[in-house]
Amino acid sequence: MTTDELTFITELKNNKTKEIAFKKLLSLYKERLYWHIRKIVISHDDADDVLQNTFIKVFKNIDTFKKESKLYSWMYRIATNEAITFINKRAKERNVDITEYQQKLVSSLDSDHWFSGDEIALILQKAIATLPQKQQLIFNMKYFEEMKYSQISEILGTSIGALKASHHIAAKKIEQFIKNYH
């Protein structure tokens, strides 16, 4: 952890500087966290809601942050957990399993004016939606966010070896889905 990050964390924990530091935190991480959440919950409106909940949790819990990981990794973990909790709750409300729920969401992407991808991007999203939740997370973090396995390991609390294996399996499943599409 750098001196700058330690200073920033101190500012976030200090009642006199917390508000200004938190505005800086928002501007630094809002967009990256939004896109991470969006890949999990699919819908723009839902991603906005989950992002807001994430920052509320970060704000409320910054005093408990122990500096055992980077601030961004800690926030990323909160965002991931919030997004997973959100979609699990939505799937349960609709009495469907999580994979079925996500596939329905992806199917509605082509009519979502917030989705700017082409047909190939849509097929890729459909393929990702067929993966188990953890494989989706790992694939999205590695492929779209270009994270290193060490970062993903810190966020998900999974060994690097297990992450590599999950990513490899996910990539093979996606490749097979795309080959069989249409």
Image (spheres, helix red, strand yellow):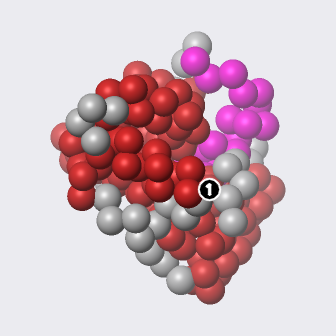
From the viewer's side, name the closer residue of 140 and 30: 30
Q: Position of residue 100 (x, y in %)?
A: 41, 48
- 81 to the left or right of 130: left
Q: Which residue is mark 1?
A: 141
**Residue 8: percent from the left, percent from the top?**
46, 45
In this view of the protein, which residue sits in the foreground, 67 or 119?
A: 67
Left or right for 63, reference 107:
left
Question: In the rendered image, is residue 41 in sight?
Answer: yes
Residue 118 drawn at (x, y percent): 77, 27
Q: Residue at x 70, y 48 (%)?
A: 144
Number of marks in picture: 1
Quadrant (top left/top right/bottom left/bottom right) for the C terminus = top right
- Give the quadrant of residue 51: top left
Which residue does the image show at 27% across and 32% down from the upper left?
A: 16
- Say if 87 sits above or below 180 in the image: above
Quadrant of the drawing holding the N terminus: bottom right
Q: Residues within 10 Å of mark 1 (few under 14, many from 20)?
A: some
Residue 111 is inside the magenta segment = no
Q: Quadrant of residue 107?
A: top right
Answer above or below: position of 12 versus 138: above
Residue 125: in magenta span? yes
What's the magenta bit mostly, secondary-structure-wise? Answer: helix
Residues in magenta, as a range = 114-129
Disc 1 residue type (three-letter): Met
105 over 170 or under it: above or below: above
Q: Nearer the viewer, residue 35 or 116?
A: 35
The secondary element bearing badge 1 is classed as: helix
Q: Residue furthest top?
A: 113
Residue at screen point 44% across, 74% down: 157
**Quadrant of the rendered structure where residue 174 is?**
bottom right
Report whether residue 84 is seen: no
Residue 81 is situated, as x and y percent measured from the top left of the image, at 34, 54
